[in-house]
């Protein structure tokens, strides 16, 4: 099926309604870097989005929605072919409980359906009718206090960026911090201190989180847990499953079922 014409998010920022929504599609590897006056919820109906903002990185699968407050610069990269639904909120209608920084939330089955429906609503909808009620329900279906288990800090230090990019691209890379230090020209002591300062985690925890993030997209593509475990650097499915469960609260073999 041919891709629909690309929609411009700027066309949805000044609509005289408290909420606006649109759908889009992105090919693998496409990148969009921008900011906008309205807050935004992004739902990847198909595929996985890599998003970056405020020196953090998220991989957003169909089980999650990504929240971006107004005027926050951010970038989105399509890890695979991605079909998105974006829901924009006029800052005047943002709720006090909405987080001041980007984060992810679980996408309940109802929230997914609401976002799909909202993207099909005409911009100048009847606020007092069914369309207006659907728009309002979107925000009521989110637990704004929910914790965010699908993010890692992204450092500013160029040496740490080299390490983090290497692990993101090759999550099965098991080099120690001492070995990475030889590559980037820093002692392991310096790198240990900088990792905590710039990512909020020790190196080993950061690598575990990144491996779990990368595992999401492989699981969603239907890869067996054993293959995923090896691909992200674990010697056995049991050790991988234990880490995945501890970080996400979910068993990896059940993970892809959450999008059904």
Image (cartoon, rainbow, N blue to C red):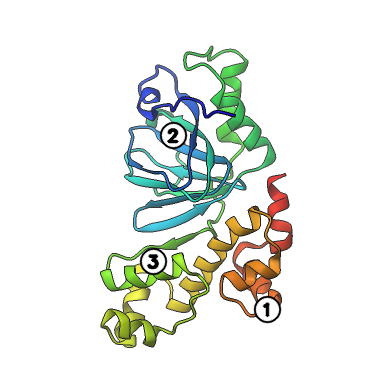
Give the answer, above or below, for where 213 lies relative to 33.
below
Q: Is 215 on the left-hand or right-hand side of 173?
A: right
Residue closer to the observer: 100 or 31: 31
**Dividing the image into 4 quarters, which one contains the C terminus?**
top right
Name the residue: 45% across, 65% down: 168
Give the answer, above or below, for where 119 lies relative to 164.
above
User: Mark 3 falls on what kind of element?
Assistant: helix
**Dividing the image into 4 quarters, which one contains the N terminus?**
top right
Q: Mark 2 or mark 1, which is nearer to you? A: 1
Q: Determine whether label 2 and label 1 are within 8 Å by CB.
A: no
Q: Which residue is mark 3?
A: 165
Cα distance between the residues tagged 2 and 3: 35 Å
Q: Earlier in the sequence, mark 2 or mark 1?
A: 2
Q: Determine whether label 1 and label 3 are within 8 Å by CB.
A: no
Residue 36 spot, x, y in % from top left: 33, 35
User: Mark 2 falls on what kind of element?
Assistant: loop
Q: Looking at the rendered structure, which numbered label has been put on residue 94?
A: 2
Residue 97 spot, x, y in % from top left: 48, 43
Cα distance between the residues tagged 2 and 1: 45 Å
User: Mark 1 falls on what kind of element?
Assistant: loop
Q: Earlier in the sequence, mark 2 or mark 3?
A: 2
Q: What crowding class fits label 3: few (fewer than 14 Cα within 10 Å), some (14-19), or many (20 or more)?
A: few
Q: Looking at the rendered structure, which numbered label has been put on residue 236?
A: 1
């Amino acid at each position: 099926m041919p891709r629909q014409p690309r929609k411009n998010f700027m066309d949805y920022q000044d609509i005289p309604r408290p909420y606006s929504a649109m759908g889009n599609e992105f090919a693998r590897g496409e990148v969009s870097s921008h900011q906008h006056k309205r807050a935004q919820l992004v739902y990847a109906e198909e595929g996985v989005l890599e998003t970056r903002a405020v020196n953090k990185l998220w991989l957003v699968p169909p089980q999650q929605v990504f929240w971006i407050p107004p005027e926050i610069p951010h970038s989105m990269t399509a890890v695979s072919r991605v079909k998105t639904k974006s829901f924009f909120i006029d800052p005047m209608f943002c709720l006090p409980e909405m987080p001041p920084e980007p984060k992810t939330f679980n996408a309940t089955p109802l929230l997914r359906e609401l976002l799909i429906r909202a993207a099909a609503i005409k911009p100048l909808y009847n606020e007092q009718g069914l369309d207006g009620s659907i728009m309002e329900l979107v925000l009521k279906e989110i637990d704004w206090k929910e914790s965010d288990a699908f993010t890692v800090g992204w450092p500013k230090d160029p040496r740490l960026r080299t390490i983090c990019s290497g692990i993101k691209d090759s999550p099965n890379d098991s080099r120690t911090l001492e070995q990475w230090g030889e590559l980037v020209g820093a002692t392991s002591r310096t790198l240990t201190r900088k990792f905590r300062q710039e990512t909020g985690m020790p190196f080993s925890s950061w690598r575990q989180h990144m491996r779990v993030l990368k595992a999401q997209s492989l699981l969603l593509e239907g890869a067996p847990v054993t293959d995923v475990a090896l691909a992200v650097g674990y010697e056995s499915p049991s050790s991988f499953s234990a880490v995945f469960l501890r970080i996400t609260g979910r068993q990896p073999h059940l993970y892809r079922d959450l999008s059904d």
